[in-house]
Image (tube, rainbow, N blue to C red):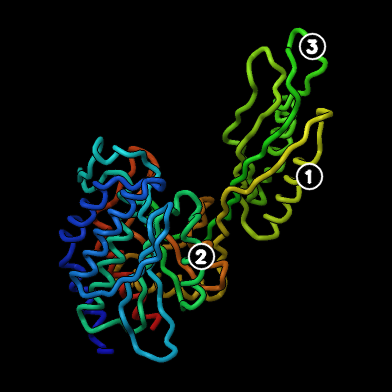
Amino acid sequence: MSSNRPNEVTSWLASQREAMLALLEEVVNIDSGSYDKPGVDAVGERFKRFFAEHDIPVSTVPDETFGEAIKAEVAGPGGANRPIVLMGHRDTVFPKGEAGRRPFRIENGRAYGPGVCDMKAGLVMNAFVLAAYKKFGGSPAPLIGLITSDEEIGSLSCRPVIEETARSARAVLNSEPGRPSGNVVTGRKGGVFMKMEVFGKAAHSGGNFEQGVSAIGELAHKIVALHAITDLPRGTTVNVGLVSGGQSVNTVAPLAECQIDLRYITPPDRADAMRRIEEIVARATVPGTIAKLEIKGEFKPLVQDEGAKALFQAYQGAMKELGRPLGGEFTGGCADSGFTASVGCPTLCAVGPVGGKAHSPEEYLEVESFVPRAQAMALTIARLA
């Protein structure tokens, strides 16, 4: 590799600010909620067109229900040189029509629009870093740009692709938005998302009340017990976020259900919390009720091992070289970076452009951070190789 290539790459990226924002505007203005397969794939098609324009080969993993997974590859030296993965998701949490209601705009140095920082800006940044290395003769190590389609609902279809890609990689840079502080994320909680159903027996609440068995009554006891698992000093939280049940106001409820969100820091924390949850499910306070638990989705925790620590130090050094010192943060939010870390690949998260208030109408991106974060990624790649 030419010793001057990182400088060529970063100089070119500095000239691409308006092009980055133009592409970002296009993809933000396409609705791509996780369950909107046509919209998610339309965003994917726009990125595939970008890669074709820059002569970057692309492969896809189709899915009948969700958007396809996309891999864009820039070659590096041959042999056993393992790739560096630039990762991100293109689905959002917003309903169809949201992009039309509040399209992309820039105001007072911030860009707005659905998914602008979480995480379409990160994907645009990744695409331009791939294009930069392709333009100047290839990367010092093979690069894979992995664009997934369903992170916001737990990566139901893309998790196998993510894990398979990470197993053969030397490092993963996940371009979730940089923290409002400018920091990156070095640790994340894991999450388990569950549904619990409680079954009782219907009876008329006036005529034969005593023959009924209230599933709602049992669910109430279970919710109190579930919330008691929360241990804030340990970093374990259990939240029952949705409840439903009953047949009518004058019927003893034959059925009730709730949805449970468990967050934890380490795998042993998960094992302990799940054991206690399963005990609550099995134990009946209201005689005659039974309950059933189903795991609907799960994220693994991002735990910083020695490899991830070295990756963070390489990125931190790149940012310092750009005159932008930063630190690492821990967050309770989950991301695909937990899957890559869980298979043993050094992973750093939230290396995308800086933004905040994700999942809300106030979601924003700091426009000024776009180029420096792209340059930092490019320099980190050079440092790792």
Q: Is mark 2 on a helix, strand or loop?
A: helix
Amino acid type, residue under disc 1 in the picture: Glu
Disc number placed over residue 105 in the picture, else none = none
Residue 118: x, y in percent? Answer: 37, 51
Tell me which amino acid carries mark 3.
Answer: Asn
Dividing the picture into quadrants, the one containing residue 98 is: top left
Q: Distance between the residues labelled 2 and 3?
A: 52 Å
Q: Residue flagged by tag 2: what amino acid is it?
A: Pro
Q: Do the residues labelled 2 and 1 touch (CB within 8 Å)?
A: no
Image quadrant in which the C terminus is located: bottom left
Q: Is residue 276 left or right of residue 319?
A: right
Q: Residue furthest bottom?
A: 79
In this view of the protein, which residue sits in the foreground, 265 or 292? 292
In terms of depth relative to the viewer, which is nearer, 305 or 51? Answer: 51
Q: With 45 as the anchor, is 219 left or right in this view? A: right
Q: Name the residue under label 1.
A: 279
Label 3 residue SS: loop
Q: Of callouts 1 and 3, which one flags the residue occurring earlier in the amino acid sequence?
A: 3
Q: Mark 3 points at which residue?
A: 208
Decide which of tag 2 and tag 3 comes sooner along the chain: 2
Task: From the image, tell me which residue sits under label 2.
Answer: 160
Lower position in the chain sequence, tag 2 or tag 1: 2
Q: Residues within 10 Å of mark 1 (few under 14, many from 20)?
A: few
| Label 1: element kind | helix
Q: Identify the residue at image location x=57%, y=59%.
A: 300
Give the camera-side residue of 275 and 254: 254
Label 2: how many Cα within 10 Å (few below 14, some 14–19, many 20+): few
Q: Is residue 164 above or below residue 251?
A: below
Q: Residue at x 18, y 72 (%)?
A: 12
